[in-house]
Amino acid sequence: MSAKELDYWIPVLLPRLLLLLFSGIILSRIFAARTRRLFIRRIPGLSAVEEAVGRATEMGRPITFSLGLGGITEGRGVIVLQALAIAVHVIRIAIRYGSRVILTMANPTLYAVADEAVREAYTLEGRPEGYRVEDVRFLSDQQFAYASAMTGVILRERAASNFMFGRFFAEALILAEAGNQVGAIQVAGTPIPTQVPFFIAACDYAIIGDEYYAATAYLTREPVLLGSLVGQDYGKMILLGIILPGLLFFSLWHGVTGQPVRTDLLHVQNSPVKMGARQSFPQQVEKWFRAGGK
Amino acid sequence: MFNFARLAANPGLLWTYSLASIGACLAVLALLHFLPRQARKQLLVFLTFAAGAVYAVDYFWAPSPSGQPNPLSGVTGVIGNVLQVVAGFALLLGIYNLVHIHANNIRRTRPNWGYSVVFFTAFLAMLIAAFWRESYLWFGPPATQLRLSDLPPEFILDRNTLSPAVRTQLGLPPTPASFNPLYANDFYTYLFRGFYLNLQATMFSILAFYIVSAAYRAFRVRSAEAGLMMVTAIILMAGQVPLGMALTNWIPPQSDWSGLRIENFSYWVLSVINMPVQRAVEFGLGLGALAMGLRIWLSLEQGAYFGEEV
């Protein structure tokens, strides 16, 4: 195979092979977990779900649950499906406690699924008459219209507990502060890294990163879900095994030879080596040191 | 696989495809309704797997070096269009939900029912403004036969927003050079740019105050780590504003010590310390999303509402 063909096939095949590898590992752990009891560490935010529902029951005030922006038909539909799974779990606990949950969303396609899921939850808990149409609300598909409508729901209903799971952007802090204004206990989780700091600052409990996708496994303790978590952990270890040698190679190659590493094979567009426009702080220190402190 | 040009040129074929698609959907729904529970579950598992398999095979079937796409690339495009249509219908469902809830609020004069009146006023105003503005395109004559009397009133459609060709055809003078289409003089623009965009900006601007209140409440220096976080946050914030940059402006920008200028140091913290951590979190999130996607695709998802009997 010529160099030109290699240049084409390596970036095409490598991600596909990695995807197959990780998928195989996750599936193998899922099937293996059916015969074993697996451990999962405590996640404070998820442990607080029952506490939050109980607080709402004691205070006689409703619970609000926001599914955030985004819908099922978009590329990141798994985010909102995970949020809906957590929402249904919270609703089922609330039904047992006799509390009311107001579920809001910003996507009409999601509304169809959420409405059916909530009806199913009431039926499975033996309280089909408890379902109210007003408790599942599509507010708006526009970001700040949704934020203002959700803020209004939280303030007017004086929510005792506020859950926020799903895709959030700038409106995250608006919703969290609205919950703070009414003194609600707040549990929030999002896989969007830019919004996690706002949730940490404004909410009582925040679910960070991986914990978001581990939530259903943690809440239900289903063997399949726990096995999937183990598979993810194995995948992370493999990634670490790839990254560490690569990191050492890049650092040593550039440090010893002074030559940039060829990154176009992996289509690395914004490598700091390639950019090279600005001397970094360590480079300046090194330059100063070599110049004898001058 | 799907030749849209051929379909567009052959209305009979287009109608056949459309009716056959609707018939297939109805057949599947009828099957789901009449099949016994276990068979229904197996049918859903099969349909879910088949739908996901199309995308999986399309991804793994790598394009050739000549750029020739695989045969499934046309199918995924069609499925994407179908999803857009379904989303459009779902919007009607969302509107029904909104109207139902607010109408009940007014009918039963629940607390704060006045806001529901505001909702209907705004909803109807925007609906009428938007649809009336475009009505001549849907219900009027073809563009080449358009007359001035076919257009909606001036306060609904600002004539300056029409294209030069249409204005010439209607015998209107050319649009003034000072005209800015963003500030057209019609009802729709008043509502959208005058009300909606400004309200949106208002909500966004609340964030500035909320950030301050959340930071004041949350940032308590009770430990060494909290102190380090506070110092780093101050440096990063100072590096973004001219006042902060002025503190280290005395360091020459091309000198060996330019890395200590606050904007350079904050950039270094963001790109060298923060970015790898964010990427590490994203790796974990990616694996989590992959795991959940696999579980849903292969119908292995359990718990909550997934594992229940259909």
Image: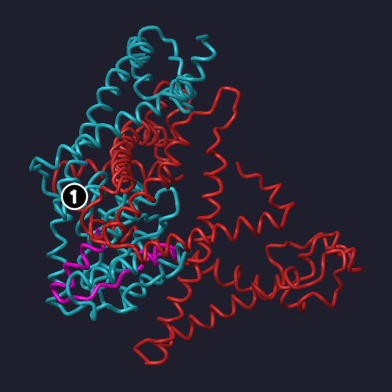
Chain colours: A cyan, B red
Decide if residue A196 is on the left or right side of residue B139.
left
**Residue under the image location 43 percent in, 63 percent down:** A109
Magenta region includes residue B12: no
**Residue under the image location 81 percent in, 76 percent down:** B150
Tell me the quarter of the picture where residue A257 sits: top left
Residue projecting furthest to the right: B171
Q: Which of B22 and B122 is in front in this view?
A: B22
How many numbered callouts? 1
The image position of residue A166, as x and y in percent, is 33, 56
What residue range appears in magenta? Answer: A86-113
The image position of residue B33, as x and y in percent, is 36, 66
Tell me the quarter of the picture where residue B44 sits: bottom left
Decide if residue A208 is on the left or right side of residue B193.
left
Q: Nearer the viewer, residue A69 or A14?
A: A14
Decide if residue A220 is on the left or right side of residue A285.
left
Q: Mark 1: give few (<14), some (14-19) or many (20+) Cα within 10 Å.
A: many
The image position of residue A57, as x and y in percent, is 14, 75
What chain does mark 1 sit on?
A
Q: Nearer the viewer, residue B258 or B288?
A: B288
From this view, report whether residue A37 is shown above or below residue B112: above
The image position of residue B255, as x and y in percent, is 45, 22
Q: Which amino acid does label 1 sit on?
A: Ala
**Residue under the image location 68 percent in, 54 percent down:** B13
Prevalent SS, magenta region = helix
Decide if residue A203 is on the left or right side of residue A55.
right
- Identify the element where label 1 is drawn: helix
| Residue under numbered circle 1 | A217
